[in-house]
Image (tube, rainbow, N blue to C red):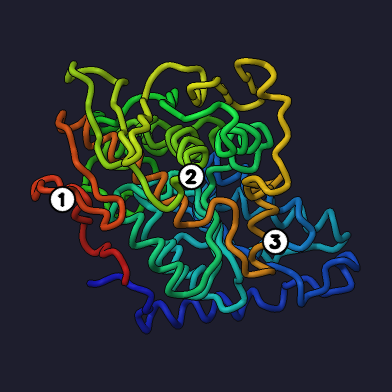
Amino acid sequence: MNIDSRLTRRHFLKSTAVASATAPFILPSHLWSAETPPSERIVMGFIGVGTQGRGLLGGFLGNKDVQVVAINDVDTTRRESSQKRVNDYYSKSTGADHKGCDAVKDFRDLLSRKDIDAVCVATPDHWHAIPVIMAANAKKDIYCEKPLSLTIGEARAMANAVRKNDRVCQTGSMQRSSQEFRKACELVRNGFIGKVEKVIADVGGPSRPCDLPEEALEPGLDWNFWLGPAPTRPYNSVLSPRGVHGHFPNWRSYREYSGGMMTDWGAHHFDIAQWGLGMDASGPVEIIPPADPKAQKGVKFVYANGIVLEHGDSGGVLFIGDKGRILVNRGQFKATPDSIGEEKIPENGIHLYKSGDHLRDFLNCVKTRQRPICDVEIGARSATVCHLGNLAYWNHRTLKWDPAKEQFIGDAEANTWINRQNREPWKLPV
């Protein structure tokens, strides 16, 4: 069975019934503030409501021009808990009993709804590409958590689908919407630290093959659906803790589902390095692993201009130039010498995209049809840097990369690593 944007007759009938049943519950305009008439409201569905997904749900609910009408999760407790949260929120805010938020186990039921304008995808990483591509094909705008993809090939397929369908897609690398990171990158891009020689990004190490023991599977979780395109394996609660939990599950440590901290934090700090180097549409040309095959840091990304991005200890993202340095992290900014931090960007200088709120920026772009601050192409390129580093660690060899063609140079074996084979029936949609 080839899973694509088309639905089986059974699926179509089921999803049509869902849409029909929920449509009358869309809030009438008199219950909304005068600033958000129905024509300006963004109707959203949420795919994945674990810890991160619930945080994003709360953030989007806080925008009066958003109406959440559907929740999807393969865990019954999480799904129904978020459904109740949405209905309770609207009941309280409108003073009327609200039952208009649907809850579905299969994300395709959500995507089939014509009334949904945009979706938020906050699943584990191995479940990003298929829903995002299907959402784009269904003409939905998309907010997708970082890292954008599990593989280099998925990142390109996702970006291509978004462009083909003229969709807005914001990648959740939200540091771009924080003023300290924008300030750092603007100063670097405008030459205030001189010629950039090196950047050191401080993130954790690569993921490893999953070796968790089997545990008893409790009712309420569709484990086969959770695995989806990943290889079949027995259930373990480390991967999908039952119910509404308050921590970030450790599926991130395992190669079948994620790229480890290299992608989890790399999608933040490597993303800022790319921004500061002006490489949002490109990437490195050579990736050199550390000498020690067991090392978890030390990989070097060499760009065509000679600048080296190193995966190392710096306390954040450290830009090193021949006239100064800038170290930036969340809530932290340190320039050396101090005077660099006081410089003003000239009117005719490089002024980077300014966003003070990552979610709001996405919503604004849904309305204006402009590309957001961390557009899908940016997210794809930053994720690719992370994946290139992991491939160098996992295989312990120097890799030559063509960022224009997104192919390894003179290395047929390495080019087989760009994609992974999905478990049937979960084909990557076209």
Label 2 crowd (10 A; few <14 / some 14-19 / many >=20):
some
Left or right? Give the position of 136 relative to 211: right
Q: Secondary structure at mark 1?
A: helix
The amino acid beneath tag 3 is Asn
Instruction: Quadrant for residue 124, please give it.
Output: top left
Tell me the tag on residue 262.
none
* Residue 83 makes an appearance in the image: yes
Q: Position of residue 334 (x, y in %)?
A: 63, 19
Label 1 crowd (10 A; few <14 / some 14-19 / many >=20):
some
Work out whether residue 95 or residue 326 is closer to the camera in this orientation and state it.
Answer: 326
Check the picture and name the quadrant holding the C terminus. bottom left
Front: mark 2 or 3: 2
Q: Earlier in the sequence, mark 2 or mark 3?
A: 2
**Alpha carbon distance from label 2 to label 3:** 24 Å
Work out whether residue 128 or residue 78 is closer to the camera in this orientation and state it.
Answer: 128
The amino acid beneath tag 1 is Asn
The amino acid beneath tag 2 is Gly
Check the picture and name the quadrant holding the N terminus. bottom left
Q: Residue at x 38, y 78 (%)?
A: 7
Left or right? Give the position of 242 relative to 87: left
Q: Are marks 2 and 3 in contact (CB under 8 Å)?
A: no
Tell me the tag on residue 278.
2
Left or right? Give the position of 129 relative to 231: right
Q: Name the residue that disc number 1 marks.
A: 415
Q: Secondary structure at mark 3?
A: helix
Q: Name the residue that disc number 3 marks.
A: 364
**Alpha carbon distance from label 2 to label 1:** 26 Å
Q: Position of residue 65 (x, y in %)?
A: 76, 63
